[in-house]
Amino acid sequence: MRLGRACAALAVVLTVLLIVPAAGSQLPNEVRALWVVERSLNSASSVIAVVSAARKYGFNTLLVEVPGHSETNGIVDQRLGVIGLQPQASHFDPLKALITSAHAAGLRVHAWVNVNLVADANNLPSSRDHIVYRHPEWLMIPRSLSKELAKLEPENPAYLGTLARWTRKHSDTVDGLFLSPLTNEAASYSAKMLTNLVRHYQLDGVHLDSLYYPDETFDYSRTAMMELRENVKTSSVEAKRLSVDIAEPLYADHYPERWASLRRSRLTSLLMRLRTTVKKHLPEAVFSAALIPEENVALNQFQDWRTWLDSGLLDVVCPRAYTQNADLFEKQIAAVRKMATSSKVWAGIGSHRLSVRQTLANIEAARRQHADGVALFSYESLTDPTLHEMDYLERIAEEAFLISALTPGPL
């Protein structure tokens, strides 16, 4: 079995190196990253395609969606409840093959991990072992559902069904189902998932995403309200005079500042815990996170990235400036660049929503603001002829990446 895996990985490497020549010998300092969603890596041929495209078009870093892996062969363990790289055959590990071939091609691989976002409400996981079925009590609940769901036990299928239907109805603002950092067990679960990943793969970095609450109306789950009560009781004499029968949402209303502070601090604590996990097993790995670029919007979702920057928690920050407004894009990158005095900045560009000209303009804007790199979303959309021109990446390579970018420069 091991020999078969080794042969498969070697075949991928040799294919990439043979079919895609190096673009040149000069190595720039700019990081040129490409996000790759998990569904793009479902076979050896798909791995070859991704690495070949990145090498051919001047990218030097791949941000690969890998939420979690098993203890055995690195393939995503559905019992642990994550959506990620799926095994196509018992002998093929997509992530391992990608890392092997990418490294041979001079590319770096960062695991892109969705921390809080664990499921798409429009397509709930088919496996009953998924975390949303095993521990629905760990999921964030909007305030508008708090009283209704308080009447149901989380094990009741109606609990998850109600939350999923609400989320689908609000899909324009809520991305899916989220784990709550206010739940200690959920935080431990996230740390375990990341430990499984960094213990089994020689990654160049870990890139965290979905480190936020959907909006200010989350999380009003039972556990979250219990955590707030305990937080207030241990630090406020006035809290002792409150009736123990007070409605839980009203309890949050009575202490809005403390409630907001608790949600921010728990998210920051989770980030600290995940950083410790990564650095313990891969001390040289680059630890990065996607940021909501507008600070006021980020704070409304309790993503206190100014504190993260001031505390040196991130080696690299990646503001996902997915606006279609060129001036706003540059302002957002400039604002983050100004505050990130001790962290590198990779400008996240939502190329899936942009023309080639718009993406090129954003790359130049990022360079004007002295960003340390750019990251384009995403390989899937930019190579899909039904969504973009066939030569999208080729034009980016020719007009923006004029020299070889086979390995990134120093961080």
Image (cartoon, rainbow, N blue to C red):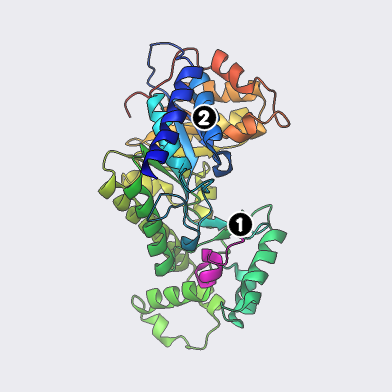
Q: To which quarter of the image does residue 250 belong? A: bottom right
Residue 299 at x, y = what percent? 49, 52
Q: Secondary structure at mark 2?
A: helix
Q: Can residue 220 be spotted in the picture?
A: no
The amino acid sitting under disc 1 is: Gly
The quarter in which the N terminus is drawn is top left
Examine the structure image and report whether residue 137 is included in the region drawn in magenta: yes
Examine the structure image and report whether residue 262 is included in the region drawn in magenta: no
Residue beneath the point at 70% across and 65% down: 165
Vertical side of 241 occupied by 398: above or below: above
Neighbor class of circle 1 (other Cα within 10 Å; few <14, some 14-19, many 20+) is many
Q: Is residue 176 left or right of residue 22?
A: right
Q: CA distance from mark 2 to mark 1?
A: 31 Å
Residue at the spot of label 1: 176
Nearer to me, 272 or 50: 50
Residue 143 at x, y = what percent? 60, 70
Vertical side of 239 occupied by 279: above or below: above
Q: Secondary structure at mark 1?
A: loop
Q: Name which of mark 2 and mark 1 comes first in the sequence.
A: 2
Residue beneath the point at 43% across and 59% down: 264
CB-based contact (under 8 Å), mark 2 and mark 1: no
Q: Which residues are magenta?
A: 125-140
Nearer to me, 173 or 187: 187
Q: Can residue 218 be spotted in the picture?
A: yes
Q: To which quarter of the image does residue 100 belong? A: top left
Q: Is residue 334 left or right of residue 165?
A: left
Neighbor class of circle 2 (other Cα within 10 Å; few <14, some 14-19, many 20+) is many
Residue at the spot of label 2: 48
Residue 152 at x, y = what percent? 61, 81
Residue 110 at x, y = what percent? 41, 38
